[in-house]
Amino acid sequence: MDRRFSFQDFGIGIISGLAIGAIAGILLAPEAGESTRERLVVTAENLKLSAQELIDNAKNNLEMAAGRLDGALGAQERSLRKRLGELKEELEKYNLSGA
């Protein structure tokens, strides 16, 4: 089975890997409980910020892509309307109803 991974799959994998690595590192570190809890809180906050940055970047990239697509489609639409106008003018030359 050929499955392609999306950016969403990649992002989820990165976040999951970071979370698992951070938790394993904290739990296996030889420190006092209070110090470990403080580090866990800081690591969780950093993970949340990293996830938010990833989401914001994805949103920005999607907005940029949509803008580019709108621009490209707009240019094609203008070109098509111009060409249709030219064709209409050409056809009006052959107006047989006035003959």
Image (cartoon, rainbow, N blue to C red):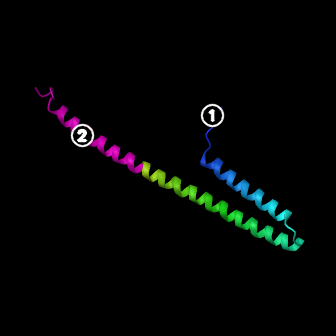
**As drawn, 48 above or below 68:** below
Residue 86 belongs to the span the image colors magenta: yes
Q: Residue at x 56, y 56 (%)?
A: 59
**As drawn, 71 above or below 97:** below
Q: Nearer the viewer, mark 1 or mark 2?
A: 1
**In screen coordinates, is 64 left or right of 88?**
right
Q: Are marks 1 and 2 in contact (CB under 8 Å)?
A: no
**Label 1 amino acid?**
Asp
Q: Which SS class for mark 1?
A: loop
**As drawn, 14 above or below 26:** above
Answer few, some or many: residues within 10 Å of disc 1's Cα (few below 14, many 20 plus, some between 14 and 19). few
Q: Which SS class for mark 2?
A: helix
Which image quarter: residue 41? Answer: bottom right
Q: Residue at x 14, y 26 (%)?
A: 96
Residues 31 and 82: in front is 31
Answer few, some or many: residues within 10 Å of disc 2's Cα (few below 14, many 20 plus, some between 14 and 19). few
Q: CA distance from mark 1 to mark 2?
A: 47 Å
**Label 2 amino acid?**
Gly
Residues 65 and 18: in front is 18
Residue of label 2 = 85
Q: Position of residue 73 (x, y in %)?
A: 39, 45
Q: Quadrant of the C terminus?
A: top left
**In screen coordinates, is 7 left or right of 91?**
right
Which image quarter: residue 94? Answer: top left
Q: Residue at x 69, y 51 (%)?
A: 13
Residue of label 1 = 2
Q: How many marks?
A: 2
Q: Position of residue 40 (x, y in %)?
A: 80, 67
Which region shows up in magenta?
70-99
Q: Position of residue 38 (x, y in %)?
A: 81, 72
The label shown at residue 59 is none
